[in-house]
Image: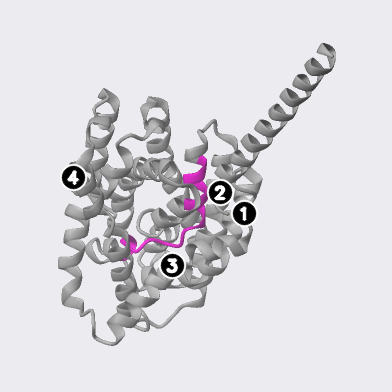
């Protein structure tokens, strides 16, 4: 009788262990998700593109006039975006590693440089020369939309940990654009370092300093909630204004098919291959690999248009590349993220 009871108890223990294992495994599957499909990625990133379309429609119908843009973006850059960055960085465990921070900044700088070099090579191959748009082509095609479009996509796919690392990665990108990028565009050695003293970078530096000394967990309660509420609208507003700006630029220049084809080749094929290779073969944390996969899928960034206007480039070339790659990225983005995630071994926080 005693032996039967003991056997029954042992059987129940085994059943409970198996059940616990099954629940734990199911929890991990829910946490990390399955290998994602292009359809799931499209459904996840479609809100970003719908905001761009909404901005274009609002500009076209005169609801959002051009004179509003500067004031809105000033509030976004100086107040809302820094609050959003702080809210995501404070308490982020992945940023407590100095090596992760250095890798993020270094790759942000290095991969933009790789994209610009690829742009210079392709620009020369399609017949562009200095004075005919080659430098503008290289910078426009080589630099992805590393912030406003990337951040919402990254948060949807992989959550706050990867998003916090994105802002650190973007310090390297900003340094690359406002140093080497400016020298390439202008053809002069001067670097406008003051451009690097802006709200987002200051927020990243403050956030990293607080994480390093362990004060980030002290920002709680009403203060943290206020920071979160101020920052939550930063990206929707910025993306909306991006749509407005694209409507302003559309149709202003006669398209050049070699510029369009070359820009798409660099931004949507060759540069993504370089970024995904770095994510695959460098010894990086999972969160940084996630950042790089999303960066690889991004279209050209609108900052190149601004730089071309300020530093003597050819804005028409930049406008064509930005608009063409943004439209095409709705088709290429899901496949780059899906294939890149599978190749690298990433899974997303998708149902």
Q: Is residue 304 left or right of residue 13?
A: left
Q: Nearer the viewer, residue 174 or 118?
A: 174
Dot placed on the residue nearer the N-terminal end, 2 or 1: 1
Q: For residue 270, which numbered disc appears in the image?
A: none
**In this picture, residue 133 sits left or right of residue 272:** left
Which residue bears the numbered disc 4? Answer: 197
| N-term-proximal mark, 3 vs 2 | 3
Return the mark for residue 36. 1
Q: Where is residue 117? Give x, y as percent.
A: 46, 50
Give the residue pinned by disc 2. 348
Q: Residue furthest bottom?
A: 61
Q: Secondary structure at mark 1?
A: loop
- Tell me which residue sits at (61%, 60%) in the image: 335
Between marks 4 and 1, how big is the CA–CA gap?
Answer: 38 Å
- Measured from the top left, where is residue 246 in percent x and y? 34, 74
Label 4 environment density (alpha carbons within 10 Å; few <14, some 14–19, many ≥20): few
Which of the two labelled residues, at mark 4 and mark 2, occupies the earlier sequence position?
4
Residue drawn at x 41%, y 68% as measured from the top left: 322
Q: Earlier in the sequence, mark 4 or mark 3?
A: 3
CA distance for labels 3 and 2:
17 Å
Question: CB atoms at circles 1 and 3 under 8 Å apart?
Answer: no
In the image, the segment drawn in magenta is 289-305
Q: Residues within 10 Å of mark 2 (few under 14, many from 20)?
A: many
Q: Are marks 2 and 1 in contact (CB under 8 Å)?
A: yes
N-terminal label among 4 and 1 = 1
Position above or below: 291 against 46: above
What is the quadrant of the C terminus in the image? bottom right
Q: Which residue is mark 3?
A: 47
């Amino acid at each position: 009788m005693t032996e039967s009871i003991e056997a029954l108890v042992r059987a129940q223990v085994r059943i409970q262990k198996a059940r616990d294992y099954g629940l734990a495994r199911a929890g991990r599957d829910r946490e990390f998700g399955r290998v994602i499909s292009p359809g799931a990625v499209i459904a996840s990133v479609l809100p970003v593109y719908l905001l761009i379309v909404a901005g274009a429609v609002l500009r076209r119908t005169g609801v959002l006039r051009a004179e509003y843009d500067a004031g809105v973006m000033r509030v976004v850059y100086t107040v809302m975006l820094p609050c959003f960055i702080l809210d995501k960085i404070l308490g982020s465990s992945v940023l407590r590693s100095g090596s992760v921070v250095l890798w993020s900044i270094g790759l942000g700088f290095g991969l933009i440089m790789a994209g610009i070099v690829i742009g210079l090579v392709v620009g020369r191959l399609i017949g562009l020369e200095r004075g005919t748009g080659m430098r503008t082509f290289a910078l426009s095609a080589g630099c992805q939309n590393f912030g406003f479009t990337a951040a919402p996509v990254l948060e949807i796919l992989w959550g706050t940990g990867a998003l916090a690392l994105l802002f650190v990665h973007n310090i390297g990108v900003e340094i690359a654009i406002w140093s080497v990028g400016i020298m390439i565009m202008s053809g002069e050695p001067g670097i406008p370092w003051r451009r690097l003293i802006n709200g987002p970078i200051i927020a990243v530096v403050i956030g990293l300093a607080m994480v390093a000394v362990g004060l980030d967990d002290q920002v709680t309660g009403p203060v943290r909630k206020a920071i979160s509420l101020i920052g939550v609208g930063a990206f929707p507003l910025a993306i909306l204004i991006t749509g407005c700006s694209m409507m302003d630029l559309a149709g202003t220049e006669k398209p050049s098919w070699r510029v369009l084809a070359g820009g798409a080749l660099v931004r949507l094929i060759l540069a993504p291959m370089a970024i995904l290779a770095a994510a695959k073969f460098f010894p990086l944390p999972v969160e940084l690999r996630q950042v790089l996969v999303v960066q690889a899928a991004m279209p050209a960034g609108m900052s190149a248009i601004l730089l071309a206007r300020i530093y003597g480039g050819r804005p028409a070339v930049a406008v064509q590349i930005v608009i063409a790659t943004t439209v095409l990225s709705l088709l290429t983005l899901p496949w780059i993220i899906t294939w890149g995630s599978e190749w690298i071994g990433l899974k997303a926080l998708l149902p």
